[in-house]
Structure formats: structure tokens, C-alpha cells
Amino acid sequence: MKSSLFLCLLPLLLLALILAACGDDASPTTTDASKTPTPHSTASAGTTVLPTPEQSSLPTPSVSEPQTSGSDSVNSSDLPSDSSLSTPETGEPTTVPPVTTTEEPAATTPPEVTTTTPPVKTATTEKVTTTKPVTTTKPVTTTKPVTTVPAEPPAPEVHWVVTCNEYINLRKEASTASATITRITVGESVELIKFTGSFAKVKYHGLTGYVNASYLTRPDGLGTDADLTVVEPVQNYSYEQMQVDLQTLAEKFPDLLTLSTIGKSEEGRDLTLAILGNREAEHTIFMQASIHAREHVVTQIAMGEIDYILHHLDTVLENGMTVAELLDRVAIHIVPMSNPDGVTISQTATVPPPFADQYGSDTAVLWKANAKGIDLNANFDALWYKYESMYQSDTPAYAGYKGTAPECAAESKALAEYLRANDFELTLSYHTSGSLIYWSFDADNLPEVNAKSKEIATLLSKKNGYGLGSQSSSSTAGLKDYAMQALGIPSLTIEFAINSAPAPLREFEQIWARAKETLLTSAQWVLKTE
Ligand SMILES: [Zn+2]
């Protein structure tokens, strides 16, 4: 069937090649770049127009993949390896933007193969009484010897659709410098083998190669309906929507989701805490998202995980426990939006009053700090004095200002107090972008906690294909750094997404597919190391 399909499509393929030959290696996206109001242009209002680092480091516009600087070579190996990347700060490892937003050209109904693509839905999301780990798309569950499946079938075919303007390149290696095998036009589907860094290893008409993963979406649109029951993927998932969804979930699962708050933001919004699982559990882990405002897609990932976990209680995990049993042993404390004021600034493109003369709405979209212009993830008491950033500012700013003292911002103070008041065995911080997991801090002086952090980072990396990143010495004063140095808690900063923040909606599925097991894997790891 495949070969006949291939024959049918051969003329199309040839046509595509001919068409493609008309252009240079130019990006499917760059063509749109001029008309797309990318959020990277800065303030119009007179004063200091802060160039975003993205702007200044824009690559030649003729590359089709958004280049995650540094990570290309890093990710070129199959197994994500420790790259010792030295990015200037915990936040973004300098993802250079392709064309951030809206270039989704209506993903035309993908041609052939797509029909064979039940993205392993557990149809009725409700009580997925999955007799077996219908464990959806996970290509990873191999470690289990218990498999009842007869002769190991080749990894489940998971098809993804190319969403771009014209075409993307299928390359020999996971690197933009690698040779192009062929081009894949918009709307065509590929079979996903695995993600690796910002690339996906795929099969396309018998050819195997690598494409930029950010151009892959699911054929069924935002194909997460098997996973998400309450949370809906949108471009700007707001503070208000998060509260509504949390209430809905807490009403449905009163014994397994407990809502409270760890404090208030500078503008008086709740720093909402959701405890997932048995409140009295002997093991606890902590996760927070969106401490950097414009990276707000990770709030949706955090919320998606809560939704997914609660609706898959009967699913059997790799360690043999059901999700429900795991939640009985491990409570997961989640602050899904650590910086609600900043997120609101970014999502509404509204500059807060004190900065009205300084910035325009374009910069508001790129807001990283809190409403007072403090970068919360540079405001913790962990080598705070050494903090340096590519955004560096000595005064309150949309990014790069560490404040007058550690914990001088309401949000970072509340987070630090909550960490001190509990006895967490792991902290996770969700950021974008770069497809990397940062695990180290002050490694020379903190060997034990670094070793443990690296262990869980490696475990997650094997599953989601994100590379490991070490930290540069100037990257300090983050939540992870504080948890590791002051409290001795193994901690990770996970940089989801490929495109620079805010991540475009079309990236959601790709991020979600890689992110959705993060908490479950982490909770199992905590149990394993007890
Ligand atoms: Zn960040």
C-alpha cells in the first residue's frame, strides 16, 4: 500500500522538487516575514529602543529552520548529549526567531496516509479504563518487559503534517548545516520516529531524515483531544482561563486537586497553587511555570498535564503503578503561572503605566519581567550579585533587571518562601525556548545535588529528546539555582519550544507531545530514588 501510494505521489514529489528548484533554499516562512507583524520590532515611543537579542542576532533570512543557536550542533547527535552550552542566562538560550507567529497556511487536508493515523486516541477521554497502557503516542515504553504485544511491531506509526508556507527541508542530520535529502511541501505528512533537540527524525516516502520539528502539527488539528479534556490550546492562555479550568478540574476531582495560593502578585493577582494528588503524600515535588511572562505557553503545558493526569488515573505506568497509585505516594505542587501580571502584559500587549513612555505594545508582547520590571528568575538568592544577562539592565525593564535585592519582588519572595516551607525532593521550572534541559548550578561546590539533577535531566531527555544544557557562570539567581544551592533540592529548568517566545500556537502539539509525561516521569523518579 505504501509503495503504491508512493507511486501515486511520485509525480507530486517531482513537481514539488521542480517548484522548489525555482527558489533558493529559502525558508518557507521567510516569505511571510515581511508581512507578519513579528513581535520583535520594538518600541515606537521615542526613548531607548531596546533591541531584542533576537533582532540583533537574526541569521541570514534564507534558512528554512529557525536556528536555535548552539543547539544545532548539539542536537545533531541522536542521543541528546550534554552540550555544555553556555547560554548567558537561565531563560532563553538565544533562540533566533524564524517567523514567530501566524504563518500557518491552512494546513490543507493532508493527502494520503493521514487516514491511517488514529493518533492513538482513547476516544472517550473520561474514564479511560485503559485495560492496558493504551499509553498513547509514547514511543518510549520499550523498557517494559511485560509487553503483551506479540512480535514487537515496528514503533507505532505516528503521522504529523507539515505546516509551513511552501516546504521544509528533509536533512541527513539534525542540523541546518546538513545536506538536504529532499523537500517536503506544506500539507504532506511524515511519520515521526522521534524528536531530537529542535529536530524530528521522520520517514517520508521511504526516506529517513530530519526536519525542523516546529513545522510539524497533527493531522487532526490541535490533535490533543485524546489527552486534554478541559484545557483547550489557544495562543494566549490567560490567567482568567486558568482559574476557570482549575475550578472545573477541582470540582471534578476534589480529592486529587487542591487549590490554594502561595501569595499575591505585585498587582494583586493570585499566585495560585494546585496540589495534584494526595495532600498527605510522603513524597512531594514542585513545579512552576511562566515565571518569565512571554513564555506563557508553558502555563498551558502545566495545565494540560494536570488535566491529562487526572483523566488517566487508571493508566498503568512504566513502574507498574497506575497513575492513581502514583498520586497517592507523590504529591505534585504546581504553580502554573508564577508571573500572572507579566503574562497578562504580554498577552494583552499592554505596557504597564510606569513604562508607558519607554515601550510600545510590541515590547509588551515580549515582556519577560513582572509588572514592576523585575526579572523574577534573576531575583533569587543564589549568586544574585553575579547575575548577568544579554538583556542586562540596571533599572526596571521589560527584561534583564534583577531588582535591588534578592526576593524584592512579591512573586519571587512568595515562591522562595514556599520552597523553604516545604521539603521538596525535586523542583521543575518550565520555560521556553531552546529544547534544552538545564540541570547544573555551581557544580564545583555542589556535586551531589548536581549529580541528582543530571540524573533526572537525563531520564527526561531520553524521553522527550531535549538536549542537556550546562549553565554558564553568569547565569545565576534563578529559582532552580536557589533550590539547588540554598535548599539542596535537585532541580531543572526545562526549555520547551523551538521558536522564540511567545511560541506560536502551531508549536503547541509538538511541545505537548514531548512535555506531557514530564510530571509522571518525575514523580516515578522520586519514588525510585527513595
Ligand atoms: Zn525563561
Image (tube, rainbow, N blue to C red):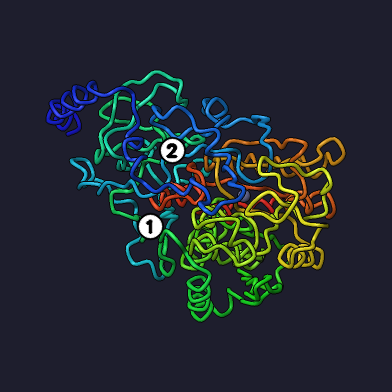
Q: Is residue 304 visible?
A: no
Q: Residues within 10 Å of mark 2 (few under 14, many from 20)?
A: many
- Left or right: where 342 falls relative to 209: right
| Vertical placement of residue 18 versus 490, above or below | above
The amino acid pointed to by label 1 is Thr
23 or 40: nearer the eye? Answer: 40
Do we see residue 474 in this rendering?
Answer: yes
**What residue is at 41 percent from the left and 70 percent from the top?**
127
Q: Is residue 104 above or below residue 359?
A: above
Question: Real-space Cα distance between discs 1 and 2?
Answer: 25 Å
Vertical comparison of 401 with 313: above or below: above
Q: Which image quadrant is residue 223 in?
A: bottom left
> Which amino acid does the dot numbered 2 rest on?
Pro
Which mark identifies residue 224? Answer: 1
Query: In the rendered image, which residue does mark 2 sit on?
Result: 98
Q: Residue 426's spot in the image, x, y percent?
A: 72, 54
Left or right? Give the position of 387 relative to 236.
right
Q: Quadrant of the C terminus?
A: bottom right
Q: Would you say 318 lies left or right of 221 here?
A: right
On the image, the x and y values in percent for residue 84 come to 68, 30
